[in-house]
Image (cartoon, rainbow, N blue to C red):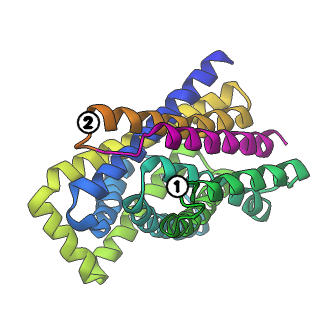
Amino acid sequence: MTLAIILAIVAAIFYAATNHIDKYLISKAVKNADYRSLILVSTIIAGGVMALIYLFVCGFSISFDFPSIAILFINSALYTIANIFWFKALDRDDTTIIVIMFQLIPVFMLFLSPIFLSDQIITPIQLLGGGIITLAAILITYEPAKKKFDKGKLITLGLMSVVSILYALWFVLERYVNQNHDFNQTIFWSNLTLFLVGIIIFVFISSYRKSFKKMLKTNGPKVIGLNLINELLNSFGGVLSTFAGTIASVALISFTTQGVQPFAVMIMGIMLTKFLPKTEKENITKKVVIRRTITIVLCLIGLACIEFG
């Protein structure tokens, strides 16, 4: 049990690191917050490399039925659209605020899971948990000094609501496919279809193609390197949380990972602001940190209701 929790915490730290790397990519590594080049890097390059890695992991055993491949292709398109909104939101506000809003994912999964997964029901306690998380996401947009909700943060919340819906659907559909397939094979086809989505965007959307070529000429190695590190960290986090789920309850691992991640993001944000302000700078005044901590705790309470209710 202790080992499982430690693995879940490490996974959460990996996920938190990817959030800050994404923030650096959109705010520092590419000019004018041009998310288009990042989208193609995360699909063509990262998707292609991860597909190759999992090709070896699954021992070249890649037999898969066409309907499942079609679902994963649609899923990769959803994932790509979600990333567009994710980068737009990250460019608008501190990473900590974005990740607090990101906690809406389990709320949307609560309603999407019964549609696609068997034996999934919604309890009153889970509904309460979803309400608490939603309240926390709304509260983070409130500015006590101005005694009103910040319009900019409300727009960010709207963007993150779209991101959360799409990611929730992506998680549920991938879990649906994985019910009847080997995990590594599913991840291989998920990355291969992501690669194909990127190729389609590159071929048919000229603005993305031009942005990608420009990025390769100006800051290509750094952007590609950081993106690949991001994908590896995300993959390692997934492997750790999946393994932890085999030696402890999945609900406990999910709660630990999702609960620790926003705290880890906030702590990393504070450290980066203090020691590497040129990399990332967040608002870390005492009042702001206390408000963010309160909303994270509310998310934790809501998550506990969803996972154990």
Query: Does the stretch in magenta take in 131?
Result: no
Three-letter amino acid code at the position of disc 2: Leu
Frontmost residue, 204 versus 280: 280
List the residue tagged with mark 1: 63
Q: Is residue 117 visible?
A: yes
Q: Secondary structure at mark 2?
A: loop
Q: Residue 218 is drawn in which quadrant?
A: bottom left
Q: Which residues are magenta?
A: 280-309
- Residue at 81% x, 56% y is 118
What amino acid is labelled 1 in the image?
A: Ser
Q: Residue at x 34, y 46 (%)?
A: 21
How far apart are the alpha carbons under marks 1 and 2? 47 Å
Q: Residue 150: x and y, percent?
A: 53, 65
Graded by Cα atoms within 10 Å as few (under 14), some (14 to 19) or many (20 or more), the crowding at tag 1 reads few
Between residue 231 and residue 123, name the one nearer to us: 123
Question: In the picture provided, is 148 more to the left or to the right than 76?
Answer: right
Q: How many marks?
A: 2
Would you name the residue on which mark 2 appears?
276
Residue farthest toward the right in the current orientation of the protein: 124
